Amino acid sequence: MSLLEVKNLHTYFHTMDGVTKSVEGVSFSVEKGSTLGLVGESGCGKSVTSLSVMQLVACPPGEIHEGEIFFDGEDLLKKTPEEMRKIRGNDISMIFQEPMTSLNPVFTVGFQVSEVLINHRNMTEEQAKERVISLFKDVGIPDPVRRFDNYPHQMSGGMRQRVMIAMGLACKPKLLIADEPTTALDVTIQAQVLQLMREIKEKTNTAIILITHNLAVVAEMADFIAVMYFGRIVEYTDVKELYKNPKHPYTHGLLNSIPRVDKPKTDVPLPAIPGVVPNPYKSPKGCKFHPRCKFAQEKCRQEEPPYILLPGTKGHFCRCWYPVKN
Amino acid sequence: MSKKEKMTEIETKDYLDVRHEDIEPTFSDDVLVGCHNLHKYFPIHGGLFGAKIADVRAVDGISFEIKKGETHSLVGESGAGKTTAAKTLIRLYDSTGGNIYFRRQKTGLFEDVTKIKGEDLRSLRKEVQIVFQDPSGSLNPRIPVGDIIEEPMIVHGIKSKNERKDRVVEMMKIVGLRPEYLKRYQHEFSGGQRQRIGIARALVLNPELVVCDEAVSALDVSIQSQIINLLQRLQEKFSLTYLFIAHDLAVVRHMSDTIGVMYLGKLVESAPNAVLFNNPAHPYTQALLNAVPVPDPEIEHNKKIIMGDIPSPINPPSGCRFRTRCPKVMDICKVEEPKMKEIEPRHMAACHLL
Ligand SMILES: Nc1ncnc2c1ncn2[C@@H]1O[C@H](COP(=O)(O)OP(=O)(O)OP(=O)(O)O)[C@@H](O)[C@H]1O
Ligand SMILES: Nc1ncnc2c1ncn2[C@@H]1O[C@H](COP(=O)(O)OP(=O)(O)OP(=O)(O)O)[C@@H](O)[C@H]1O
Ligand SMILES: [Mg+2]
Ligand SMILES: [Mg+2]
């Protein structure tokens, strides 16, 4: 049994301009101790997918229209708000892109992480403090005793992200959802944080959903990758297969178009994907990628392809009428 | 001399020893812009009377040159001084020390522009332009895009309205925007299109040097490649010279002819593209390159990760500024500041190991 299984998830927002179907028929699973990379461009629905799992989508305007979310065999969508609150922070926790917005500026970081333990684990203040200091040490915060009393603004971006990770790990979750955890950081600090996440995974067997738009970061971190476009997963497979054998024209196009630090400079233009992501309120007919797809044919313009297991593969899923032949 | 000028004169006096030195740096004929021992300090005021109590040494003595038609990149962690170096070079900030040289559009002569003023400075403003990271922050939201692109021409006294309008349409076509969109406001455009507007505005006066400060950093992956291609196409078409600032080293490798690596206000290494990426000499450059993730899961990552953060530029470490994080630190690094040395032709680095 998978740790997390999301089946046919639909999350919509009802706004003044109409309905945006931010997540449309998303299905995936995450195994114990493995890392799923959720990649895609801005607005494709990565955060809404993870917020749906946590049931943190604001309602209204948001609504989980349809779907099932099994965690440890139980359907989270059937839980009461009180039960969900217990699960969040305990079994599933989430860390966000900009720690400055998720840490409260008026309380010390030590106090804020302690709160989680006091609320979820019924610890006393002293017990919590002791545990927080050891957590700070685990996530590589130097001088943890002194840092306990720091306010968020007294720390660098990298240190704040470590505090967030410490908070995320405080209750030893089974699943950690990290939404762009390194996007705001320098590469050097990013490397430190990613290294830390790898160590955590090895030591604690925590499953991770890593959300990012960075195709290089997921290549290093993930065991499996789901590529999203316009609210849908368009491709899913294990990390090596995805980079060697991308089947969806979008994945294929992205991997070919990004500049690479490991390849010498050439004078040829990057094979960029033309056009832009469609307006969320004006969903194109047929395949949502067809207006930008160089392989598009008449069928693609008329009918949306289903998300299927590609014949002859072990777990390579794709949503395309004409998968790329490599 | 006005009172204000007098003030800055006094403030900068401490560092003026580095200006007007006897050694005139030499630049070859194909160089468009260069700086020698450039400094930019930001005073920090405090205390009862708001006196100066310290300096942020944002740029602390750097020298480099950019050949005409080439792209020079500045890389380094946040706070290294990349933006400040660029803004000081193009005279958006007054330098605290050092000299700036520019081959002028009108005369073709290489001039010291460190202290030019008035009409001369205004004319330099046409020759250098800057494109920022967040296009929406630098474009006025209440003005239609046509006017945004037109504005620099009004400021610089291009009188004929028709001439200006034609030029706006031309620029929009060049950067890939539909001229019909002239009357639209920037919020009606996507991030990539807004960056195209910023580029059109920057190029409308035919500049020689364009500073691209994280100009592609905020863009989505698929849009980023489009804008990179656009910048390269425009460079070729108009023989533009770029000073390119980006934190994404993959983009830097793709774009640059030469690269300077900055750390805490100093240049620690500079080299042509292939040399820097294949044969980085400074431990900081090595660490920086090592930290970049590669989009290939088959590559084993045995990363030697440097720890810690960049120290404060108010009170930088003595000797070599990188020593507090350097894996190869030696005794001498604490006492003596390493000088930039040429370790092979056009490859400079500042490290006691070299
Ligand atoms: N509260 C909301 N109200 C209306 N629309 C929303 C809301 N939250 C998200 N959306 C819409 O849902 C879509 C998906 O957004 P989401 O935040 O999941 O994107 P993302 O993939 O995380 O992008 P990014 O990389 O920019 O974080 C977007 O079109 C967004 O505008
Ligand atoms: N106007 C200013 N007044 C005071 N200090 C400043 C000012 N501008 C920059 N600084 C300081 O100078 C140093 C260099 O800043 P700068 O913005 O040039 O760095 P950068 O390399 O461009 O960083 P980033 O990658 O974050 O853009 C920083 O410590 C910054 O806080
Ligand atoms: Mg998001
Ligand atoms: Mg900057």
Image (spheres, grey):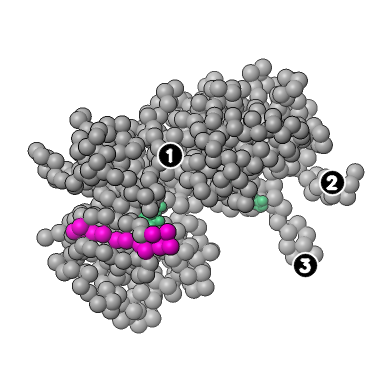
Furthest toward the left, the residue is: A312
Q: Which of A134 and A157 is in front in this view?
A: A157
What secondary structure is marked by label 1? helix
From which residue to which does the magenta span run? Answer: A6-18
List the residue tagged with mark 3: B48
Dot placed on the residue nearer the N-terminal end, 3 or 2 = 2
Dot placed on the residue nearer the N-terminal end, 1 or 3 = 3
Q: Quadrant of residue A34?
A: bottom left
Mark 3 surroundings within 10 Å by alpha-carbon count, few (fewer than 14), some (14 through 19), many (20 or more) = few
Mark 1 surroundings within 10 Å by alpha-carbon count, few (fewer than 14), some (14 through 19), many (20 or more) = many
Residue type at mark 1? Ile
Q: Give residue A115's position: percent from left, percent from top.
A: 39, 76
**Magenta span contains residue A12:** yes
Q: Give residue B255's position: percent from left, percent from top.
A: 48, 30
- Foreground mark, 1 or 3? 1
- Gap in angstroms between the C-alphas marked 1 and 3: 51 Å
Magenta residues: mostly which secondary structure? Answer: strand
Residue type at mark 3? Leu
List the residue tagged with mark 1: B223
Q: Does B103 sit above or below residue A40?
A: above
- Gap in angstroms between the C-alphas marked 3 and 2: 24 Å
Residue A137 in view of the camera? no
Q: Does B20 sit above or below residue B47?
A: above
Residue in the image at 23% along x and 59% along y:
A9
Tag 2, which chain?
B
- Gap in angstroms between the C-alphas marked 2 and 1: 45 Å
Tag 3, which chain?
B
Q: Does B114 sit above or below residue B46?
A: above
Is there a contact, CB below 8 Å, between mark 1 and mark 3?
A: no
